[in-house]
Amino acid sequence: MHPIPWEERPANCSDPMWRYSGNPVIGRYDTPTSNSIFNSAVVPFEDGFAGVFRCDNKAVQMNIHAGFSKDGLSWNIEPDPIQMEAGNTGMIESAYKYDPRVSFIEDRYWISWCNGYHGPTIGLAYTFDFKRFYQCENAFLPFNRNGVLFPEKINGKYCLLSRPSDNGHTPFGDIFLSYSPDMKYWGEHRCVMKVTPFEQSAWQCTKIGPGSVPIKTEEGWLLFYHGVINTCNGFRYSMGAALLDLRQPEKVLYRSQPYLLAPAESYELRGDVPNVVFPCASLHDQEGRVALYYGAADTVVGIAFCRIPELIEWLKANTL
Amino acid sequence: MHPIPWEERPANCSDPMWRYSGNPVIGRYDTPTSNSIFNSAVVPFEDGFAGVFRCDNKAVQMNIHAGFSKDGLSWNIEPDPIQMEAGNTGMIESAYKYDPRVSFIEDRYWISWCNGYHGPTIGLAYTFDFKRFYQCENAFLPFNRNGVLFPEKINGKYCLLSRPSDNGHTPFGDIFLSYSPDMKYWGEHRCVMKVTPFEQSAWQCTKIGPGSVPIKTEEGWLLFYHGVINTCNGFRYSMGAALLDLRQPEKVLYRSQPYLLAPAESYELRGDVPNVVFPCASLHDQEGRVALYYGAADTVVGIAFCRIPELIEWLKANTL
Amino acid sequence: MHPIPWEERPANCSDPMWRYSGNPVIGRYDTPTSNSIFNSAVVPFEDGFAGVFRCDNKAVQMNIHAGFSKDGLSWNIEPDPIQMEAGNTGMIESAYKYDPRVSFIEDRYWISWCNGYHGPTIGLAYTFDFKRFYQCENAFLPFNRNGVLFPEKINGKYCLLSRPSDNGHTPFGDIFLSYSPDMKYWGEHRCVMKVTPFEQSAWQCTKIGPGSVPIKTEEGWLLFYHGVINTCNGFRYSMGAALLDLRQPEKVLYRSQPYLLAPAESYELRGDVPNVVFPCASLHDQEGRVALYYGAADTVVGIAFCRIPELIEWLKANTL
Amino acid sequence: MHPIPWEERPANCSDPMWRYSGNPVIGRYDTPTSNSIFNSAVVPFEDGFAGVFRCDNKAVQMNIHAGFSKDGLSWNIEPDPIQMEAGNTGMIESAYKYDPRVSFIEDRYWISWCNGYHGPTIGLAYTFDFKRFYQCENAFLPFNRNGVLFPEKINGKYCLLSRPSDNGHTPFGDIFLSYSPDMKYWGEHRCVMKVTPFEQSAWQCTKIGPGSVPIKTEEGWLLFYHGVINTCNGFRYSMGAALLDLRQPEKVLYRSQPYLLAPAESYELRGDVPNVVFPCASLHDQEGRVALYYGAADTVVGIAFCRIPELIEWLKANTL
Amino acid sequence: MHPIPWEERPANCSDPMWRYSGNPVIGRYDTPTSNSIFNSAVVPFEDGFAGVFRCDNKAVQMNIHAGFSKDGLSWNIEPDPIQMEAGNTGMIESAYKYDPRVSFIEDRYWISWCNGYHGPTIGLAYTFDFKRFYQCENAFLPFNRNGVLFPEKINGKYCLLSRPSDNGHTPFGDIFLSYSPDMKYWGEHRCVMKVTPFEQSAWQCTKIGPGSVPIKTEEGWLLFYHGVINTCNGFRYSMGAALLDLRQPEKVLYRSQPYLLAPAESYELRGDVPNVVFPCASLHDQEGRVALYYGAADTVVGIAFCRIPELIEWLKANTL
Amino acid sequence: MHPIPWEERPANCSDPMWRYSGNPVIGRYDTPTSNSIFNSAVVPFEDGFAGVFRCDNKAVQMNIHAGFSKDGLSWNIEPDPIQMEAGNTGMIESAYKYDPRVSFIEDRYWISWCNGYHGPTIGLAYTFDFKRFYQCENAFLPFNRNGVLFPEKINGKYCLLSRPSDNGHTPFGDIFLSYSPDMKYWGEHRCVMKVTPFEQSAWQCTKIGPGSVPIKTEEGWLLFYHGVINTCNGFRYSMGAALLDLRQPEKVLYRSQPYLLAPAESYELRGDVPNVVFPCASLHDQEGRVALYYGAADTVVGIAFCRIPELIEWLKANTL
């Protein structure tokens, strides 16, 4: 496999996470018809990487596209959206698709995204090759956003994190976990984490949602998530991390009081929706290095780096 | 079995549904601690009737109580709320319970209600005797209200109508149907009916939700539902009816353009929430007579009557 | 002509306006399909009276119906809405019609109403006989409500009062006057009266709109209008009066600081929209007696009485 | 002194508080110009009672009037508002006055009310005879409502309960206590009670405010207060009670989880603002009997009764 | 005549419209007192160009100024606002003026703008020389914005596009057309284009309004217009185009599904109102070249270019 | 004393106030844990300067830190927040602290800030050395922001400017003045300045609040203040100035119609809250030179300069 993208922490930096110097790695016009490319997911694939990308076209229609890369930095994104075939259902309606995540489970890649079916809900599909995609039943009733699958079954069941929402610019949101024996029927819904009191950790006091596919570590599932504060000039999206119990992932072991990354660079402060940092995927290697992909300002894609052992130490030291 | 409550249509009335002259049949203070009793469910039970009643106490805590009646008019409601035991799960948290429905399926009575679990969602429980109740997994993630079970499995699965919502006084709402093989995991979510354009049928243009357990007729499932219009002085809840396909209940055959019943009597126009008529249960007999129980002004319970064959004719003549 | 409806002021009453003891004169179900009849207009016609009535049917579709009466109290309202023919235009679209007024000008009766054309605006039509009606161009662009025509041309032009609004439950509103040479093109828009400061006259501090067709008196045009206060439990509509200059009707001579009539009777306090008194028409005779028709609680029609000379004296003594 | 108004608890009633059978005791038109009289205060005075009454006139201007009664039931209210003279300041601006309370302290009667000074704040005045009134400095900056003075100094200082608010129909509100050495400068602001979680006591989950002047009992200061729930059709105001520490009145000893009185009678359910019960004053005698005066539906004044020892027992048994 | 501003399409660009490399052409401080200059109109005049410019001064008072240029790039803007003289009316009140357009019709230049007359409405004035301006009757009642006149009479009447609005930051808006025989009275109001469903073309799903004076082409009137999407961090204004029928301009022949230009450059993403591209005027020559002037971020003026034949082809290929 | 920071007005600038070329002088990460440093206060101290700085940490907890500088440009800010000791009270609760001001009065430095005590209110503390701080009673009940003390007693009393608010992103706000004999009890609350009509000076039409400690001049107290306009994309904060009467500081002598400084530089247009310029402190010398410290975009601190005599002339020439 090609090594994941990586840059060492800059000399004068002591933060647990740092940005790639070549950010943004994907620009807003990187397909012929795109208005913006952001909030996208990547995974190791064959000898390189594949991904599913949110590309809003210039009519601002939201859809997801497949893409491929040798090095995780330079991407070829298909100009046309993914055409879904019927998976475990014949009902594959979709008014729009956005904010995909990709998780390899057992023998295939599962894609979860925000699917428009009489309101936003969680769409699910699988692929073996990133060429043919098979859309399955929506996991939930509306209204839901940010479906993130664990990379393996736990206690024999599929596990799906999500954020219940409303049908607009939802001003609230907590992270829940749901289980399924078959990727078709879902139940055992559990509340995992809620927003924080303003005084305790204001960056995550308005809403929180799961970000990237959890990474299995010896100490627990490492989850990157987004948190939102409602300022007088709009929502500001930042990124934090949490460690979830390996066997009971609805149990939070540690959760960051400070943010890991918040909008500060020009490509995060300006764009279609200013002040957004939105994690959707990560790559990691055996040395514990992580390349975290995040949407910036709802316009482009950036990468940030961290090391798992360091991050877990930091989490323990900075937990709520 | 004791006959269901019944009164013939008044002489000067040509409406498809008419009110019981003794309304309200249950008063707001009919338990020692209640502030209001409304939006409640009844079923035939032994040689009379049993029910599950929403009783808000004088702290305005919302809970559900069992009750019994010989004639369906005079009720003994338990002074204490139902104490749930664990059913198909150990997780039976409940911050509040309201708006119950009861459906007899196969061998037991299933209760569905709005359950407070980090927001409103659909709680489920069963009982054999209205003495011991076994709470099961919540059907859905928040936010949802108005869970109504069909009285039998369809295509081998349990069927549950509901109205996805938000966490407040939701200003929108459509009716969805979900399926389950086991009353634990739910999927195959389908949109059944949506709100109407204001110009077409304004009483149901803001939100709609399922009301009472559907009645099986030769022509389809007869569903009473509520519809809401947002006036400049608040929400006004009225009642309509729809006929759903017997085999594919997500398919609407007929749906009332006019309302069946709207707030007009004093006990519907005044109370804790003025201008509310909210159907939650019905009894019917072999002659096709229906006694429909509805909450009035979020304060008391009333009954209205109709005849199934007449109502279906009216539905066909007044369908959207 | 049949005398107008009339009752003397009750013995213990010193108010400038008093209610008819037989209120409401029109009930909500006075046509076979109506949910409510209110905010309607009457005029002398032949040897009795004719009118145009807002009848919302049980689908809560809003439309206007013709009606006739010998005495102004007992009305026969057509069960079907008015069918419009093309008047000075072929474009007579109408998604809904509500809140009609009727004004006899020169040789015909002009009806103005709130017409649904991509939002609420002012519809205009004329009739000679209340059987055939000819719809004309809408007077204005959306969004507007409460079009009220003066009963004669002033300075050679038609004069139309109205209240510009938005497309919902408008929380603001002032009274404007517009002129037209031909009932087709409108201009010379003038602001007539604005809402009052809360401290000065709170019943009319949120919005005001013209009510009934102005009555010509020696001292000016007598206009009844509605005013609204936004309470914590919704809008409350009351009625006031103003005297406008005979030649320059955009000039206000006197305007009531107190209201003339505000919701206090049961049929005004309860109904589809509680706490509404909404004047739409008046009859008067040569003795200066006035029978004022008003919608109550968006549900029924009531009558109130006053005497013009008394009212003008009261206006002078209670002007803003 | 004339005995306070009193009626024994009705036979079939076991509530801690019950309504006077002759309610409302003051009608909306009981002065020549009033639109409504409500939220008013009474005290023993000479051989009978005096009071300060909120009278909104028919322009819906809000002002306070003096009134007198022999028996506390039949009242003569001055037709003209109180004319204030300068007390401890020359700045006695007042855009409006409403919701007065009266407290006798040492040698005079102090009136506190919601005073319009660039927004609502707490106005203060004193009188010796209910004929001449001396207006003092406003206690606070805007925005505040419901100023209630303790009937004696505590630890040498005047004590004032209030509810900080905003400049509109405030959707939040807690009870605070402030101290003053001189009725001119105020400080030592303490939070006394906050709204409750929805699940715990929903009738007081949106806002709470102090009601009547606290009654000194052996066990503490007995405070009647109002609580508000925000329903989908508006605010509903109910009444509860609390016992505050005698020496440290910011310390709550007991506080009612259930309400004491909530809107249920016709004069409470209908009026200018439906569903309001708002306590402002009480009379009590040496037998521990209490006549509590409350505004109903922002329109009229009612009385309810209770006995202090019973009430304190009830409070202990029903405390939060 | 001096040639219009022009730059060829950059080599790597295949978009139908491209920005001028020297943008912004007018800076925010280009008059001595201005805070911002944007949303302004230009026309050919004498041997160069003239314009009417929206200049908000440093008190953020909104007014319009005349300006002149030889080349359309370098502008001399009068330091003082236009002083209006009375045109076809004596009533030329104006609380503020903003967002002007200029259209040469027959013998004179007509200016239309958003005029403050008890709310925003459409002001009209004419000039022959950009020195003396004659203000006419407002075209409409409030509330309206974005009045754009066609450059010639159609069917003998003046034609005015506009966007009805409310009195604030209007969250809705469609494009209407109105006719006048005399520039004084307006009628025959027709709906031209409405907002699109979110799924179909989200950049124009919240509101749309006419931009620059339509350009007559053989295939129809070419209209540039703005469209708005409501993101969680505010309104984003983009630009599209439509082709209207030559004889019945309320008939839309083609309308762009993708936007033509959306905020992406620094001067469009930052400023007093970030993320605004707002077309107000265009120049074109006989070769079909167009220089389109647009306001950027409510702060400065930019130019974009296109070719009419190309644009019409693109419109046909990308129509809704 | 070290001279205050100073730069002469740039050659091409004629504005009354100009920015420091080295802005921002304090960066967002200038303490080890800070997310942002802004809205902070400085004073002369010993042979240099001291200050109190708002540092939001990376959990976005708001607190105030002491800091020191030789030249007013280069600052050492303590990494830990100020630890308060009890001053004139034992009750020194504080859920958060932000937006400090510092005023030297008689013998000590007084700090005022927005203190979290069941909502935002004005906290007060004093220090002699910027090492030990003694927290006193909150000046007011909630809800209040922007407490600014005059640098000396007036008429024997302490004087405190503030802006009453609500508990969220307050959309209104005027400047009030309060007096205290002892820094513990406050009264004599006076309205000083209110927002302006939109047409007159829109940059300050939504809310205004006091900025820096007033500077005593021969002609009056010179106050820098902030003003806010509510654009469709959020609040924009600018800066103005006023001259208050020396003896009666609630009396406004002059007040700027144009703003003095509004967001225009990159560090003001972008950041956690874009488009904010927020004055909190100033230094001045005997030549009348002023260095004004202001928060920019709720992220960093900038300096602007002016000369007092010039500014007063400008104020007179540009007064409302």
Image (spheres, coloured by chain):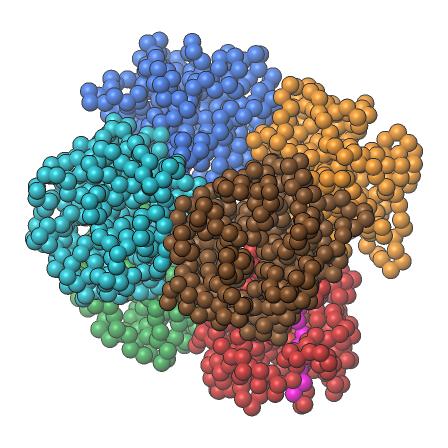
Chain colours: A brown, B cyan, C green, D blue, E red, F orange
Question: Does the magenta run of residues contain E292?
Answer: yes
- Residue at the spot 21% in from the left edge and 38% down from the top edge: B128
- Residue at the spot 37% in from the left edge and 37% down from the top edge: B90
- Residue at the spot 47% in from the left edge and 76% down from the top edge: E192
Question: Up-down: is C303 above or below F190?
Answer: below
Q: Nearer the viewer, residue D72 or A111?
A: A111
Q: Position of residue F290 (x, y in %)?
A: 84, 43
Question: Up-down: is A281 above or below C14?
Answer: below
Question: Does the magenta run of residues contain A263?
Answer: no
Magenta stretch mostly in which secondary structure?
Answer: strand
Q: Seen in the image, is A84 located left or right of residue C275?
A: right
Q: Position of residue F55 (x, y in %)?
A: 72, 39
Q: Can residue D260 be seen here? A: yes
Which stretch appears magenta? E288-299
Q: Seen in the image, is B76 located left or right of residue E168?
A: left
> Which quadrant, please, contains the C terminus of chain D?
top left
- Residue at the spot 43% in from the left edge and 11% down from the top edge: D219
Q: Position of residue A50 (x, y in %)?
A: 60, 65
Q: Seen in the image, is F190 located left or right of residue C199?
A: right
